[in-house]
């Protein structure tokens, strides 16, 4: 009975998932011997096993083996030392030269050829080839993994010099906040969220959409100069005691006057109804921006708010460089960013609704309002006006911690 190449191919494919390298050549050799003349060529074409491998397999089939040899070959697929030599074995200096190129220590070496270039595997391979090594980028990648290198992103761990009272200020703020909350007085955390472009611009994140139908947005992030577009500055007020937030969406400059107006609106719509008997208010804020510790207009506007509400307003500033520990960042702003991810902020109404719809499993509730007032930048507060303030600095770091008492 004649054996066709199709029959051989079918049998070999059925067995291939059970065969290692040695068994592949032995099965192919057995098929070749069964066919006889021309069998090696036919089997090689049908199975993809090389003629040389089939010939070696036929030699193995004809050679008697002892039980000891059989046990050893059952474990070892190739003969000891068989197979293509590794690049590192053929070129002993390859690993050493690669380590010299990629070692982070060489970044400070002006003689390092890759000091000012991207250290991709292709670039490393090119540099090694120029030094006389026969190596591909795939081999470079394998060698780097074997040398315990991996792709690493920058990690933010260096905070620079730290003030001696950095941690003490955190403890001071925590004690004061707990005391105010225990006495039923409001404690708020304030800050300005990142400014946002209004229009059909790309917003980070992904949203479920029908397959192949992403929402089209503009290619370039250029501000739209129209009355209801431009940029907005969301200023947030987070109530630590009630887990509630207020966000004023301003369309003008992010000034201290805008910041205090946002606090005023929070007090009018959320603070006073929630704390009808409040006599004092504690504000925690960053040391920079519109509510910075050195901003005179911030203190001037807070004095006016204290006069209007009759509240004793205490302010505690976080140390510069520690804004990420401000409560509003991870209790309000982060959830707003999650809620509108992948959604273009096409209008003021969309922004207000997305902010107001932000909730959490812990029961966060948010209100938002558009602030169309004008807040001109560059307003100055004179020394005379500062002298009129009822400003009381605390004994511990009065530059960070102070109170503004009502003047009436």
Image (tube, rainbow, N blue to C red):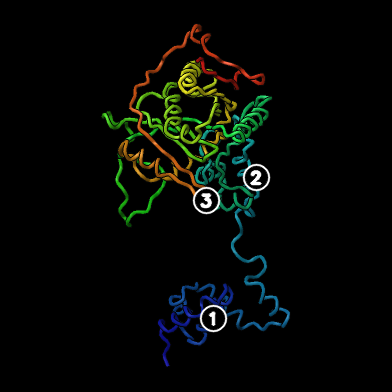
Which residue, given by chain and number where applicable, does mark 2 sit on? 96
Q: Estimate the x, y position of residue 245 in percent, counting from the top left.
A: 46, 37
Q: Return the residue found at the far bottom.
A: 1
Q: Mark 2 falls on what kind of element?
A: helix
87, 254: nearer the viewer: 254
The image shows residue 215, relative to residue 85, as above or below, that is above
Q: Is residue 108 visible?
A: no
Q: Position of residue 183 (x, y in %)?
A: 61, 33
Secondary element under disc 3, as helix, strand or loop, is loop
Q: Earlier in the sequence, mark 2 or mark 1?
A: 1
Q: Kindly identify which residue carries mark 1.
A: 27
> Considering only vertical position in the picture, is 152 above or below 267?
below
Judge from the rendering whether residue 147 lies leftward or rightward of residue 200; answer left or right.
right
Looking at this view, name the residue that lies furthest to the top: 384
Mark 1 or mark 3, earlier in chain: 1
Furthest residue to the right? 68
Q: Is residue 350 above or below residue 398?
A: below
Q: Nearest the camera: 314 or 193?
A: 314
**Residue 17, percent from left and from top:** 52, 75
How packed mark 2 is, by other alpha carbons closer than 10 Å (few <14, some 14-19, many 20 or more), is few
The quarter of the picture where residue 104 lies is top right
Can residue 116 be seen here? The reply is: yes
Residue plotted at (62% across, 43% down): 97
Separation of disc 1 and disc 3 at Cα? 34 Å
Marking on residue 176: none
Q: Residues within 10 Å of mark 1 (few under 14, many from 20)?
A: many
- Distance (Cα) linking label 2 and label 3: 16 Å
- On residue 136, the disc is 3
Q: Secondary structure at mark 1?
A: helix
């Amino acid at each position: 009975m004649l054996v066709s190449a199709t029959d051989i191919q079918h049998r070999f494919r059925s067995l291939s998932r059970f065969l290692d390298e040695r068994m592949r050549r032995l099965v192919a050799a057995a098929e070749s011997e069964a066919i006889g003349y021309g069998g090696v060529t036919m089997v090689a074409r049908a199975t993809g096993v090389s003629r040389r491998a089939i010939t070696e397999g036929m030699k193995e089939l004809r050679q008697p083996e002892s039980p000891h040899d059989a046990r050893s070959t059952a474990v070892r697929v190739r003969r000891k030392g068989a197979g293509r030599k590794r690049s590192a074995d053929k070129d002993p200096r390859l690993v050493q030269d690669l380590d010299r190129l990629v070692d982070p220590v060489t970044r400070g070496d002006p003689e390092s050829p890759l000091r000012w270039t991207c250290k991709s595997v292709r670039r490393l391979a090119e540099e090694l080839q120029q030094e006389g090594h026969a190596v591909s980028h795939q081999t470079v990648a394998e060698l780097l993994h074997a040398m315990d290198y991996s792709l690493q992103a920058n990690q933010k761990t260096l905070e620079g010099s730290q003030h001696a009272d950095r941690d003490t200020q955190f403890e001071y703020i925590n004690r004061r906040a707990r005391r105010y909350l225990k006495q039923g007085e409001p404690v708020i955390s304030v800050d300005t969220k990142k400014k946002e472009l209004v229009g059909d611009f790309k917003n980070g994140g992904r949203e479920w959409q029908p397959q192949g139908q992403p929402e089209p947005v503009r290619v370039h992030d250029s501000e739209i100069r129209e009355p209801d577009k431009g940029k907005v500055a969301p200023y947030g007020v987070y109530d630590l005691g009630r887990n509630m937030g207020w966000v004023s969406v301003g369309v003008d400059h992010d000034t201290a006057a805008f910041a205090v107006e946002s606090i005023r609106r929070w007090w009018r719509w959320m603070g006073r109804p929630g704390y009808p008997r409040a006599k004092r208010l504690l504000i925690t804020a960053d040391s920079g921006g519109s509510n910075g510790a050195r901003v005179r207009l911030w203190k001037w506007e807070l004095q006016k708010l204290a006069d209007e509400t009759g509240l004793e307003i205490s302010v505690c500033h976080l140390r510069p460089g520690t804004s990420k520990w401000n409560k509003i960042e991870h209790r309000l702003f982060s959830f707003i960013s999650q809620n509108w991810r992948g959604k273009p902020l096409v209008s003021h109404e969309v922004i207000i609704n997305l902010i107001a719809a932000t909730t959490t499993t812990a029961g966060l509730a948010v209100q938002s309002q558009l602030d169309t007032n004008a807040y001109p930048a560059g307003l100055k507060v004179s020394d005379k006006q500062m002298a009129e303030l009822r400003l009381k600095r605390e004994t511990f770091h009065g530059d960070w911690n102070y109170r503004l008492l009502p003047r009436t």
